Image (cartoon, coloured by chain):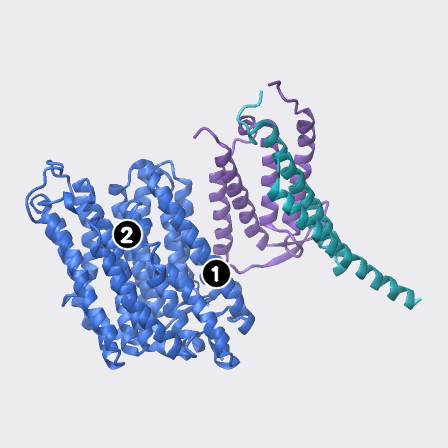
Amino acid sequence: MADILDVTQSLIQIVTTICIVVISISIVMLLYRTIKGPTNPDRAVSLDSIGVNLMGIAGLLAILLVTTKFNDVILLIGILLFIGTVALAKFLEKGVIIERDMD
Amino acid sequence: MTRTNDIILRTTTSLIAFILIGFSVYLFFSGHNNPGGGFIGGLMTAAAIILMNMAYGSEAMAKVLPVNFRFVVALGLAIAVLTGVGSFVFGQPFLSQTYAYFQLPILGKTELATALLFDLGVYLTVIGVTMTIILTIADDRG
Amino acid sequence: MSNLAILPILIPFIAGILLAFLNKHIPLVRSLAKIITVAQLLFVSWLCYLVYQSGSIILETGAWKAPYGIIIVADSLAMTLVLTTNIVAVACVFFAPVSLTEKQERFYFYPFFFLLITGVSGAFLTGDLFNLFVFFEVLLMASYGLIVLGNGKVQLRESLKYVLINVFSSMLFVTTIAFLYAIVGTVNMAQIAQRVQEVDQAGILTVIGILFFFVFATKAAIFPLYYWLPNPYIVPNPVVSALFGALLTKVGIYAILRTFTLIFVHDPNLTHTLFIYLAALTMIFGVIGALSTHNIKLIVAYNIIPAVGFMLMGIGLFTETSISGTLYYLVHDMIIKGSLFLIVGAIAYVAGTSDLRKMGGLIHHYPVLGWMLFIASLVLAGIPPFSGFIGKLLLLQGGVAQEELLIVITGLITSLLILFSMIRIFVKGFWGEKSDVLPTKPVKTAPFTWPIAFLLTFSVLLGLGAEWVYPSVQSMAEYLMNPDLYIESILKE
């Protein structure tokens, strides 16, 4: 029984480590896309995906470090991401983020 | 150009903004022993207000929330300093804090610390500064 | 435990917040600001007296014991500098309403002013390296607010440079604190000093010391890093220039003085010798700058730099005489730079220009202003019996005793050139034929005159009363040269 526990534990560690590495690589590639463009919607989408990947890393770290304190962080990144996406989308469509009078 | 339709944004905003404010209150109170605190809580509240600004426009928000945010900065700083000065009255060094357990109606046994008051000052200051900066930048009248 | 030590920081902070609330009622804000600064000056003088009588007052905030909590140390050095700061503040607050337009005052001048005083007093009083960084930030934030006051195009360009250079050096500051923390495991200055003697890591500590010096040298405008200073200091209103010129660079010098007499004393042959050479270069380049321009404000702004050189020279020589020279010069320079900036501000105001070539014959209309400038120039250049002389005499004595004749000669030549650069304003602007570009109707100068006269009185007293001032300066220098006194007063083991 103890053997199986050990194996699963080391398995989880290996898998999460690999996942973190892979996600980090994808963030780097997304960063390239953010800088290179070529169009603004590309940048918006890649920034959005960077945020999703960041949430993923936070979750994986929570597994690796065996803590629940990161759960708030994940929620926080998600909310900021949502607002960022809305702002970017509005900027792309209207050119202004906060208008004075909308009606 | 046709008028853009933002009914989805407006409907979700009216829902999500209040979830955000609720979350910010949670973060504010969890700050004593867990991740969170006045700074993050303030940022979250500011995020909610900005979201509403984006969905409804700054003029409508000025009617709904007629607050001068520079005043909020000063108020927050005043609260933060006065909690520090409050310890003078009890003959303690500056910034001394204390805590006690209270029996509250819904929450049950709760720990309340005077550090929370200091955090309230931070919370208000952060909201004030963030909103002042963003609304100043967004104001395109020159 | 004594809460008295924190009050020089708290009073201006609370005043700043209060005045931010009342911002709409400018006449009320003005009179409140005057009352608060004067009351604070009286309080700080009393506190200073108390510290001289019965030793330093130490506050452990939140009742956390010394090496663990944040401490505020009101020792004789810090209190003297806080007192000087408050003297300058009183003069500036009385000068402000005449010099600023009401619109500028409405842009939160007084709250920022009080926050600046908070930051400066805090930087002098703190006994914790990280809090030194925090108070540096407080005073820089306030200075960002003050430098853009007035909204000119030139001002925006200069303030952008100012903000960038300061943000960079602050970043380096906090990184360096992290390095030091990695070596000694504490940010309490007394404990750092104690552990530096124990850890036996001289090489890496020297590197960290030089990094700290780099940070503080950027703030204090020492030789390779002074290039940012002159322009941002002349574009804002004269009051703001006076505050900056009197206080900001001096905080940098104070930080060097504190860290390099308390913490990084393990290898003075390397660090302190470097200071001597840099001091000489700072003096030369600063005074060349002052001679190269016809803009009276720029002349005064450039004159900050050789003064910094003199103070650094005292730290570099690292003897009791030279350190007391630096202390004397520090206090003298805060007061005289404040009054000089106010004087040239007033001159530029009455003449309608700050270009020396367009001035002339001002003495006919403004005799008081002219003679005040004359006295201030003599004080700055160090003509006996004024205060600049005593400071320079001590510094040069220290230099001769250490046989660093090169710096002594440089110092003497620089003094002469400083006098020349200042007297040029007097000769060209006040003597000679009346220039026709000047407004013919004389402006009333009485409201300008009083704050300047107030500062000059202190400056002259500092020189004439050297007999009484010198013993306390000497005891401060003695205290600085024995870091153990500071460590024991805080850690009390």
Q: Which chain is indicated by disc 1?
A: C
Q: Which quadrant would the C terminus of chain B be assigned to in this image?
A: top left
Q: Position of residue B93 (x, y in %)?
A: 49, 63
Q: Pointer 2: residues within 10 angstroms few (<14), some, or many (20+)?
A: many
Amino acid bearing label 1 = Leu
Q: Is residue B63 visible?
A: yes
Instruction: Please give the label number shown on residue C172.
Output: 1
Relative image position of residue C165 (x, y in whole percent): 42, 54
First in sequence: mark 1 or mark 2? 1
Q: How many marks?
A: 2
- The vertical placement of C11 against C312, above or below, is above
The residue identified by callout 2 is: C242
Identified by mark 2, the residue type is Ala
Q: Colour of chain A?
A: cyan
Q: Position of residue C328 (x, y in %)?
A: 26, 68
Q: Which chain is purple?
A: B
Chain whose colour in the figure is blue = C
Query: The residue marked by circle 2 belongs to what chain?
Result: C
Location of the N terminus of chain B (image quadrant): top right
